[in-house]
Image (cartoon, coloured by chain):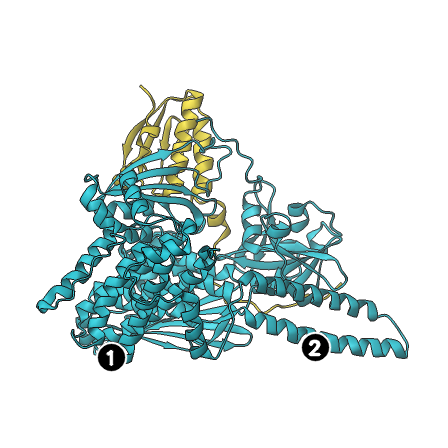
Chain colours: A cyan, B yellow
Amino acid sequence: MSLDLTQFHEIFFEESFEALDSMEAALLKLSAGEVDAELINTIFRVAHSIKGGAATFAFTEVAAFTHVLETLLDQLRSGKRQVRPEIVDVLLRSGDAMRAMLLATQHKEAIDSAGVAKLRAELDRIMGEAGTAAAAPSVAAAPAPAAAAKAGAPAATPGWRIQFIPGVDLLRHGNDPLRIIRELSSLGKVRVSVDAARVTSLSTIDPEVCVLGWKIELLGEIDRAAVQNVFEWAETECELSIERMGGEATAAAQSAAMPAPTSTPATEAATAAPHADEPQHPPRAESAARTANADGGSIRVSIEKIDELLNSVGELVITQSVLSQLAAPLEGREAGELRSALAQLERHMRALQESVMRVRMLPISFVFNRFPRLVRDLGQRLGKKIELKVTGDSTELDKTVLEKIGDPLVHLVRNSIDHGIEMPDVRVAAGKTEHGTISLHAYHKGGNVIVEVTDDGGGLRKDKILKKALERGLVTNEVELSEERILNLIFAPGFSTADVVSDVSGRGVGMDVVRRNINELGGHIQIFSTQGQGSTIRIRLPLTLAILDGQLARVGKEVYVVPIVSIVETIQVTRERVNAVAGGGQVFRLRDDYLPIVRLHSLFDIDPDHTDLLDGLLMIVEADGKRVGLFVDELMSQQQVVIKSLETNFKQVMGLAGATMLGDGRVALILDIPGIITRFQSPQERGLQTPRAA
Amino acid sequence: MIPVTEVPAPALVLDESPTRAAAPAPVHSNPNTRVTLGASCTIQEAVALRSYLLAQAAQSGPLEIDGASVQVIDTAGVQLVVAFALDCLEKGVAYKWLSRSETLEKAIDLLGVGALLEYPA
C-alpha cells in the first residue's frame, strides 16, 4: 500500500516557511559581520531540510535549486570559501526565491523558472570562482525546467499576462489600480485592456467601488516576485492571476520536469529525488526532532480548532451570565448559596476564557522579524545607514490582530526609512551620528498592547504640513491649530502629495489608510515629533478581537453595543444647538463643530421611545476623523461583550460589526461606527445596481 | 433615565467643518454645455463628482468636457468619467473633449479607457 504523501504537504510548507524565517535571521546576522560557524550551520540545516522534504514530495524544482544553494553553503561551512557581503546578498535572494517557489508550489501556480535560473547562475558563478571545483552537479533525474525550457522551447516574448479584477473594498482600503498599473509600467512595457462590462449607469454606480477590470501584458525579463510585489497591498482584495507569457511552452516544460505532486506515489517520488545516494529526511521526523530540541515539546493545532474552543467558551460565558441574572431575584438561604456558587463559576469562566485566549496569542516577533531585512534592503537602496533596534518582541497579541498589524507597521517603518532618517552627510552636518536608528518597541499597558515606531531622523516639518493642508483645503487660515492637530493632519485622507511620495513609502497607501486599519482593529494611533530629533508613532491595540469593551445603548426595544473606543462623549441635546440643513437632515453644534445627527431608529427602521431630540441622548462617535451624533433613547451599562460574527451566522450588514448575547439572553447588535457613517452618508442600498449590458 | 455618562475619549484628530464635509466642490458647474472637471478627482471627491456628472449627463447636449484642470485623479475618478461617458452614449448625448491635463491623459492611458471616452463621430 502506498502512502499518500499529499497529507503532509501543508505541514512541509508551514515548516519550510518558518525555517526560511530563521535562515533569513541568521543571514542578516552574517550580513552584520557576525561570522560564526553555528550561524552557517543553521543556514545549511535549513537548506538541507527543505531540499530533503522537497525531494521526498517530488517538488523537484525546489529540490534542485536548494541543492545548489546547499553546495555553496557547504563550501562556506567547511571554510573552503569565505563569507563576504556579495555572497550573503545572493543567499538572501536565494531564500526569497525558495519562499516564492514553495508558495507557487503550495498554490499550484507556475514557478518563476527564469528568475530561479538567473539566481542559480549567480550561485554557479560564485562557486566557480577561484577555481573551486564545486559547480553544481546536474540533476539527472529532474533537469531544471528553466534549463529545459531554454534548451527546447522556442524563445517566446518574455513577460507576464496579468488578470486583475478589483474586489469591493479595494478602493476604500486605499489600493488604487491606477497606482498599481503605474508601478507595473515602471517594470516594463505594459499593454492594458480594460473590461468595463460591470460599469453601471452613474445613477446607480457606487463611486467607491471599482467595477473596472483589467487584462495586462507586462513585457520584459521581469522577476515574478517583482510583479507580485506590486500587488502586495491589494492581493487579498482582488481576483488576480499572473501567468508567464507563452505559458503553454513553460507549462509543458514544467509538467515534464515536475510530476504532479498530488498524484505522485511515494516510490516515484523517491526515484525522482535528486541525489538518491544522500539520505532523505521526511520533514515531519526532522522537524519533530528540531521542535523537541528547541522548546521542549509542543503540538501544532489548527487555528479553526482553537476558534471552536474559544467560541464554546464564549457561549459558556453567556450562559453563566444568564444564570447569574436568573438567580439575582431569588431569595432565601439556598438562593444565597446558589449566587455564591455562580460567583465562583464566573471566576472560573473568566480564567478559562483567558487561558483559551492565550492559546491564540503569538509574540509580536512574528511581525517584527520581517523588519531587519526591510531596513537593510531599503537602507542600502537609499544609501542610508540605519540600525534597527527591537525591544519587547516577546509581547503577545491575538493572532488576528497580529496578522492585521503587519501592513500598517511596514508602511510606518518604510516612512521612517524614506522620510525620517536623513542621508549620512546630512546627519553628520546636523551633528548626529552617521547611522540613523529606527526602534520598534512593544509593551503591555492597561489591557492593551502598545507598539512604538521611533526614528531619530529629521522629524516632521510642521510648517510644511500646515502649508500643504492649507493648499489642500484641509484647514483654513482662520483657525489656529495645536501642534498635535497639525501633526495629525498627516492622517487626513488625500494628504499625501507628489513631493512626499516616492516608490519606497508612497505606494498609494497613505497614512489615512494606516489609521483606518488601526481603527478597524479597535486600536488608536498617535504621533509625536520634534523637528531635527525624530518622530515616534504610537499604536495602541486591543489584546484580542474576540472581546470588545462596549457601551450598551437602548433604542425602543432594541439594545445596541457601541464600541467604547469610538465614543468621544455623550450629551443631552438642547434645542438651540440643533440646526436643520438642506435635504432634511439635522446638525448639532458641539463647541466649534457641526456634527450630523444620525437617528439610529431611522437608520435601522425600528420604533423608538423618543423621536424628539430633547428627550433622548446624543452619543458623539468618531471614525476615520469623522464625527457624528448617534441619537439613542438611553444609555445602559458598559460591559465586555463576546463578539459573534454576523457574516458567519447571517450575512454582512453595513453598520453592524457583529452581535452578542446579553446576560438576559437577548441578542444585541454591535455597531460598526465607520459603517454607520458610510451608511448614513449614502443611504441607498448597496449591491442593487444592474450591470450595464456589455 | 440613566444620567449622562462621560466616556473617556480617544485623542481627537482632524476636525472637519460641516460646510466642508457637506459640500466638497471638486468641480465647477456651468449650466450650459461645459462639463469641467476639478483639480482633484479622487475617491475623496467621488460622491460630489458623481452628483455633478449626473446633473450634466441629464442635459440635452452636446457637451464639452474640460479636463485641463485635473491635477490629481485616481481610478475612482476615472471610473466616474467612464460611467458618465457611457451614460451619454446610451442617451445619445453627444460630447467632445476640449482638453485634458497631462495627469488625466496619463491616467486614461494607464487604465486603458481611452476608447471608452471618445464619443463616436
Residue at x 85%, y 70% (from the top left corner): A329
Q: Position of residue A471 (x, y in %)?
A: 33, 53
A662 vs A363: above or below: above
Contact flag, marks 1 and 2 (Cβ < 8 Å): no
Read off the residue under disc 1.
A34
Task: Determine the secondary structure under disc 1.
Answer: loop
Q: Nearer the viewer, residue A302 or A645?
A: A302
Residue A481 in view, yes or no: no
Left or right of A458 on screen, residue B17:
right
The local secondary structure at tag 2 comes to helix
Q: Label 1 to label 2, Cα distance in Å?
A: 50 Å
Q: Residue A242 versus residue A218: which sits nearer the camera?
A: A242
* Pointer 1 chain: A
Q: Which mark is residue A347?
A: 2
Task: Point out residue A79 in the picture as x, y percentages from the top left corner.
Answer: 18, 77
- A392 to B58, vertically: above or below: below
The residue shown at (32%, 45%) is A255
Residue A139 in picture, x, y percent from top left = 24, 56
Q: Chain of mark 2?
A: A
In the image, A385 versus A144, the foreground residue is: A144
How packed mark 2 is, by other alpha carbons closer than 10 Å (few <14, some 14-19, many 20 or more), is: few
Label 1 Cα crowd, 10 Å radius (few <14 / some 14-19 / many 20+): few
The amino acid pointed to by label 2 is Arg
Across and down, in percent, residue A631 comes to 65, 54
**Which is more toward the observer, A636 or A239?**
A239
Tell me which label, 1 or 2, sits earlier in the chain.
1
Residue A580 seen: yes
Q: Mark 1 belongs to which amino acid?
A: Glu
